[in-house]
C-alpha cells in the first residue's frame, strides 16, 4: 500500500535528498522514495517558491554600461584580492576544524587545563603553537610554563610508580580487599612512610587498584507503577501471514560526528520487513517512538488490530505511548527484560543499516549528513533493496506480489 499522507518532515527530507545529489533525477529520487515523480516535482517547486529569491533580468541590455579596460582590470584585481582573503580565511577555518576534530576524541574524558596543554604538546609539530593556543583558549605563557615543568612532572610520575608497586603488594597480600585507608595505615606502620591518604587514593585510582566492597544493586529499568504488565505475544516468532498484522520496533544510536549524535526509531512490518514508520531526532524521549508509530499509521492508513512488539525501554513502557497504541487500535507486546534475542530481528535490521551506510567508518560527517543518508537508505530499502527473507524482492515489491497472488486466488 502506498503512503497517502506525507508529513512536512518527510517532504522536507525528500526535497533535501533530491538537492544533495546533482546526478539524481526527479524520476530516480521518486522511485527510491516510492512516490509519484509529479508529487516530488510539486514539492520541489513549492520549496523554491518559499525560498523567495528574486532574480534580475540579465537580458535587459539597456542597463549595461560599457566598462573601460581600466575599470575591468581594477575590478579583477579587487576580486583576486577578495578571493585570496577568502582562501586564507578558509585555510584558517579548516585548521581550526582539524584541531577541534582531534580534540573531541582527546577530551572525551575531561577538558582540564592540563589536558589542553598536553594536547598542544602532542600536536605542536602538526599545527602552530599559536593557533593551537587560540583554538583551545590557552595562554601561550601558560603552555610554556607547563612545558617547562616537565622534569618535575616526570619525577612525580616515577615516584607514583614506585608507590603503586608498594600499594599493589599490600593489596595483593590482603586478598584484594584493602582500600585506601587500610593501605595508608599499612604503609605508615610497616614501611614507616609519612604519607597522606589522599595521595594513596589518587595513586590507586591512577593505576586502577581498588579494594573490594559490596555494592547496592541499582535498578536501571523502572516501569511506571500505573502501567499494566505487557505480555510477549511474539515468542520470538518474527513472521506474519499478511501485511499490517505484526510490527516490531526499536531505537538505535546514530554517531553523527563532531560530538553530535542522533537516534532512529523504527516500526517494521514482520510480513515483508518493510519500514512502515520511522523517526530521527537528537533525543530519546517518548515523542521519538510515538512519531515513528504515527508515520506507520499514515503509511498503512490504519493500524487497527495490529500487534506492536518492542523491548522494555522506558519510551515503550510509558503511559503516553500506551495511550497512543490504544488510540490507534494497536496491541502492545514486549520481550523479557535484558534479553535482546526477544527482539532479534529488529536488532539485526539496525545492524545491517549501520553496516551498509557507514561501511567501516566510525561516524557520519555531521548530523545533517547523517539524517540525509539514513533517510535515503530507508526509502531505498523499502522500494529498491532486495531482502533475503522476501526471496530477494524489496519489501514493497514483495507486498505487491502478495496482493496480486491473493487477488488471483
Image (cartoon, grey):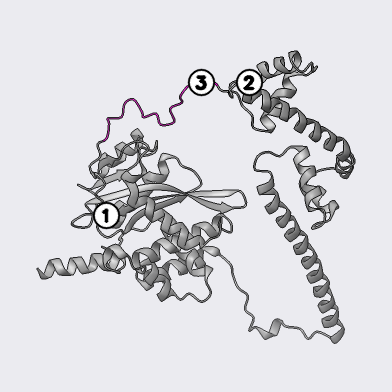
Callout 1: SS: loop
* 12 left or right, relative to 172: left
SS class of the residue under badge 3?
loop
**Which comes sooner in the sequence, label 1 or label 3?**
3
- Residue 217 part of the magenta-drawn span: yes
Q: Position of residue 170 (x, y in %)?
A: 67, 23
Q: Which residue is mark 1?
A: 270
Q: Quadrant of the N terminus?
A: bottom left
* Residue bearing the label numbered 3: 214
Span colored in magenta? 213-230
**Mark nearer the N terminus (1 vs 2):** 2
Q: Is residue 95 left or right of residue 301?
A: right
Task: Indicate the position of residue 376 as horizontal and vertical percent values.
Answer: 44, 64
Q: Residue at x 26, y 44 (%)?
A: 328
Instruction: Judge whether residue 218 is colored magenta.
Output: yes
* Residue 256 in view in this figure: yes
Which labelled disc corresponds to residue 179? 2
- Callouts 1 and 3 close, C-beta under 8 Å: no
Secondary element under disc 2, as helix, strand or loop, is loop
Amino acid at each position: 500500500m502506498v503512503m497517502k499522507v506525507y508529513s512536512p518532515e518527510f517532504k522536507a527530507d525528500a526535497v533535501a535528498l533530491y538537492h544533495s545529489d546533482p546526478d539524481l533525477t526527479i524520476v530516480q529520487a521518486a522511485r527510491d522514495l516510492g512516490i509519484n515523480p509529479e508529487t516530488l516535482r510539486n514539492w520541489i517547486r513549492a520549496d523554491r517558491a518559499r525560498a523567495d529569491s528574486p532574480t534580475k533580468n540579465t537580458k535587459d541590455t539597456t542597463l549595461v554600461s560599457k566598462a573601460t579596460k581600466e575599470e575591468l582590470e581594477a575590478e579583477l584585481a579587487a576580486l583576486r584580492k577578495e578571493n585570496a582573503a577568502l582562501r586564507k580565511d578558509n585555510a584558517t577555518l579548516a585548521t581550526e576544524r582539524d584541531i577541534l576534530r582531534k580534540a573531541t576524541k582527546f577530551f572525551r574524558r575531561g577538558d582540564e587545563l592540563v589536558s589542553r596543554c598536553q594536547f598542544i604538546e602532542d600536536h605542536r609539530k602538526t599545527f602552530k603553537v599559536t593557533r593551537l593556543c587560540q583554538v583551545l583558549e590557552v595562554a601561550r605563557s601558560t603552555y610554556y610554563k607547563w612545558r617547562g615543568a616537565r622534569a618535575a612532572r616526570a619525577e612525580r610520575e616515577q615516584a607514583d610508580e614506585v608507590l603503586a608497586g608498594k600499594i599493589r603488594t599490600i593489596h595483593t597480600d590482603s586478598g584484594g580487599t584493602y582500600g585506601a585507608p587500610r593501605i595508608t595505615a599499612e604503609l605508615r606502620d610497616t614501611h614507616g612512610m609519612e604519607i597522606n591518604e589522599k595521595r594513596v587514593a589518587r595513586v590507586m585510582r591512577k593505576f586502577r587498584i581498588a579494594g573490594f566492597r559490596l555494592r547496592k544493586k541499582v535498578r536501571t529499568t523502572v516501569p511506571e507503577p500505573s502501567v499494566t504488565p505487557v505480555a510477549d505475544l511474539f515468542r520470538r516468532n518474527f513472521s506474519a501471514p499478511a501485511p499490517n498484522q505484526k510490527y516490531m520496533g526499536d531505537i538505535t544510536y546514530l554517531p553523527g560526528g563532531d560530538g553530535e549524535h542522533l537516534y532512529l526509531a523504527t516500526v517494521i512490518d514482520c510480513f515483508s520487513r518493510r519500514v512502515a514508520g520511522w523517526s530521527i531526532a537528537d533525543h530519546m524521549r517518548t515523542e521519538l517512538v510515538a512519531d515513528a508509530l504515527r508515520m506507520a499509521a499514515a503509511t498503512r492508513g490504519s493500524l487497527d488490530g495490529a500487534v506492536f512488539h518492542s523491548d522494555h525501554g522506558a519510551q515503550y513502557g510509558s503511559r503516553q505511548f500506551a495511550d497512543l497504541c490504544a488510540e490507534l487500535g494497536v496491541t502492545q507486546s514486549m520481550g523479557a527484560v535484558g534479553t535482546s534475542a526477544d527482539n532479534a530481528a529488529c536488532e539485526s535490521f539496525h545492524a545491517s543499516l549501520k553496516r551498509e551506510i557507514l561501511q567501516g567508518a566510525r561516524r557520519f560527517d555531521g548530523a545533517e549528513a547523517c539524517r540525509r543518508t539514513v533517510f535515503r537508505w530507508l526509502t531505498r530499502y523499502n522500494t529498491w533493496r532486495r531482502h533475503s527473507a522476501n526471496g530477494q524482492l524489496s519489501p514493497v515489491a514483495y507486498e505487491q506480489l502478495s496482493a496480486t497472488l491473493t487477488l488471483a486466488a
